[in-house]
Image: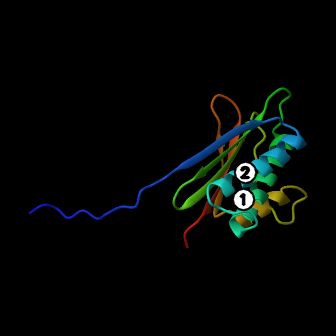
Amino acid sequence: MPAQTKPQNPVTVRVFAQRFSSTRLGARLARHLAVQRLDAWGIPYDTDLSDAAALIVAELAANAVTHGRVPGRDFELRLTLTVDTLRIEISDARGERRPREVQPEGESGRGLLLVAALADRWSVHDRVPVGKTVRADVCLLD
């Protein structure tokens, strides 16, 4: 008797990657393009998910241009949308300057409190050949 197979939903993975100048204008542009791309993928402007993504991108991009800037080097935004997760990644060239553990009473790092509150998880990874990537995942399914 042949084995019964369960029908599976097709998996569509959407990816957007763009480099930006390590400036405040570059960080602002990254935020604008992120919500524009999400809208094109079916996540409309001014929804909770779009607003959360905009805030996460804004904070991580601001950190990249403030703490991760190397003259003449860009930072990169990468968005990956799967059926159940929106992944936001910001990469910069300063691997030695990693975000510290979030301290609510600390004098810095408060923006990462926002990222931690909006994302289901966030982490920092080495970037080959140089630098780091800060990743924030937002789960789409309850």
Label 1: element kind: helix
Q: Please say if 134 is above or below 9.
A: above
Q: Please say if 51 is above or below 98.
A: below
Residue placed at 72% from the left, 65% from the top? 118
Residue placed at 64% from the left, 44% from the top? 16
What amino acid type should be assigned to the residue bearing mark 2? Ala
Q: Nearer the viewer, residue 122 or 47?
A: 47
Indicate which disc, 2 or 1, sits on the residue closer to the N terminus.
2
Q: Position of residue 38 (x, y in %)?
A: 67, 55
**Where, quadrant-wise, is the N terminus in this rendering?**
bottom left
Q: Is the residue marked by circle 2 packed among few (<14), some (14-19), or many (20+) residues within 10 Å?
A: many
Q: Which residue is mark 2?
A: 34
Q: Position of residue 92 (x, y in %)?
A: 75, 37
Residue placed at 83% from the left, 26% from the top? 72
What amino acid type should be assigned to the residue bearing mark 1? Ala
Q: Which residue is mark 1?
A: 53
Would you say 105 lies left or right of 33 here? Answer: right
Q: Is the residue marked by circle 1 packed among few (<14), some (14-19), or many (20+) residues within 10 Å?
A: many
Q: Say whether marks 2 and 1 touch (CB < 8 Å).
A: yes
Q: How is the image coloured?
A: rainbow
Would you say 129 lies left or right of 96 here? Answer: left
The reply to whether residue 34 is in sight is yes
Q: To which quarter of the image does residue 108 belong?
A: bottom right
Q: To which quarter of the image does residue 66 belong?
A: top right
Q: Position of residue 65 (x, y in %)?
A: 84, 41
Label 2: element kind: helix
Given the current orientation, which residue lies at the most extreme bottom position? 142
